[in-house]
């Protein structure tokens, strides 16, 4: 996944890993759904967000502790620690992406436009933020196709060269699966949301399964990250998002 280094590394740093639990269908906790376009959904709202847990990537063999902090619509920050030492740090703003890999003494800094050109990635800050939270992301109502399949509402959107499919559990009013397919190179990212429990009176997915599939020739390259939140909280209290690059690191 060399040509998609940013995409795989950024998403890998932003998820928490662990054992998955079987989810029993049920209604959302506390708050009722809001109507977004034609969809009834319970999205997670916040000013500042913090999560702690572990991250595990099947391809890289990475298994470590992680801390995530976010300020709504402004910054996503993550620190990855292994055996008591920080091995990576990530900071994403609406304009730029910053990643330090302390295991390889290297870093990545760039705008979305530059990263899209260099790594062929079509992604934005808002999408990453909502993927982490498990929120439904509305599109242009005139370009959405909505189908109801039993207790699941399927919404398909076309955005530039991306086909985005979102599946909402209508018994819980929560997003249960997102698929993002690049219609040009056929890359596919799927995120499955599981293990729902209460967060401030709203149902929140504490487990995720992220899969990235990249067909190259006749062989598909897959990257799988399993997710488990151990501590999650939201608040109105400001958080710190420190980031610096140690001297001597190579820029990638």
Image (cartoon, rainbow, N blue to C red):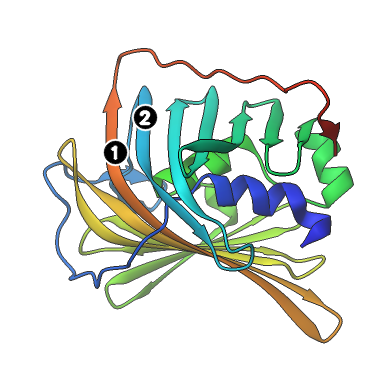
Question: On the rendered structure, is 105 left or right of 24?
Answer: right
Q: Looking at the image, is 131 positioned above or below residue 172?
A: above
Q: For residue 49, which quarter of the picture?
A: top left
Check whether the beta carbons of the residues at disc 2 and disc 1 lie within 8 A of each other.
Answer: yes
Q: Tell me the residue at 63%/45% (across/down).
A: 10
| SS at mark 2 in the image | strand
| SS at mark 1 in the image | strand
Image label count: 2
Residue extending furthest toward the top: 238
Local packing at callout 2 (Cα closer than 10 Å; few below 14, some 14-19, many 20+) is many
User: Which residue is more in the foreground, 58 or 168?
Assistant: 58
- Residue 229 location in percent, x, y? 33, 49
Q: Tell me the residue at 63%/67% (across/down).
A: 59
- Residue 15 location in percent, x, y? 47, 50
User: Which residue is more in the foreground, 199 or 137?
Assistant: 199
Q: Looking at the image, is 134 positioned above or below residue 46?
A: below
Q: Which residue is mark 2?
A: 49
Question: On the rendered structure, is 3 left or right of 74?
Answer: right
- Residue 246 location in percent, x, y? 73, 22
For the N terminus, the quadrant is bottom right
């Amino acid at each position: 996944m060399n040509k998609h280094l940013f995409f795989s590394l950024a998403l890998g740093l932003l998820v928490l890993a662990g054992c998955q639990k079987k989810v029993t269908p049920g209604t959302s906790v506390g708050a009722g759904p809001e109507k977004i376009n034609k969809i009834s959904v319970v999205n997670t709202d916040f000013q500042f967000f913090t999560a702690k847990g572990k991250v595990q990537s099947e391809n890289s063999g990475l298994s470590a502790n992680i801390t995530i902090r976010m300020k709504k619509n402004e910054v996503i920050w993550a620190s990855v620690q292994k055996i008591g030492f920080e091995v990576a740090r990530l900071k994403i703003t609406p304009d730029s992406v910053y990643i330090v890999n302390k295991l390889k003494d290297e870093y990545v800094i760039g705008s979305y436009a530059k990263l899209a050109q260099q790594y062929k990635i079509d992604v934005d800050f808002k999408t990453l933020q909502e993927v982490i939270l498990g929120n439904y992301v509305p599109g242009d109502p005139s370009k959405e196709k909505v189908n109801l399949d039993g207790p699941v509402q399927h919404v398909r959107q076309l955005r530039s060269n991306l086909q985005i499919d979102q599946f909402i559990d209508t018994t819980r009013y929560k997003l249960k699966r997102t698929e993002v397919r690049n219609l040009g190179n056929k890359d596919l990212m799927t995120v499955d949301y599981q293990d729902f429990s209460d967060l401030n009176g709203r149902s929140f997915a504490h487990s995720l399964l992220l899969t990235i599939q990249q067909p190259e020739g006749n062989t598909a390259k897959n990257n799988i990250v399993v997710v488990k939140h151990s501590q999650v909280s939201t608040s109105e209290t400001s958080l710190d998002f420190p980031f610096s690059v140690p001297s001597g690191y190579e820029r990638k």
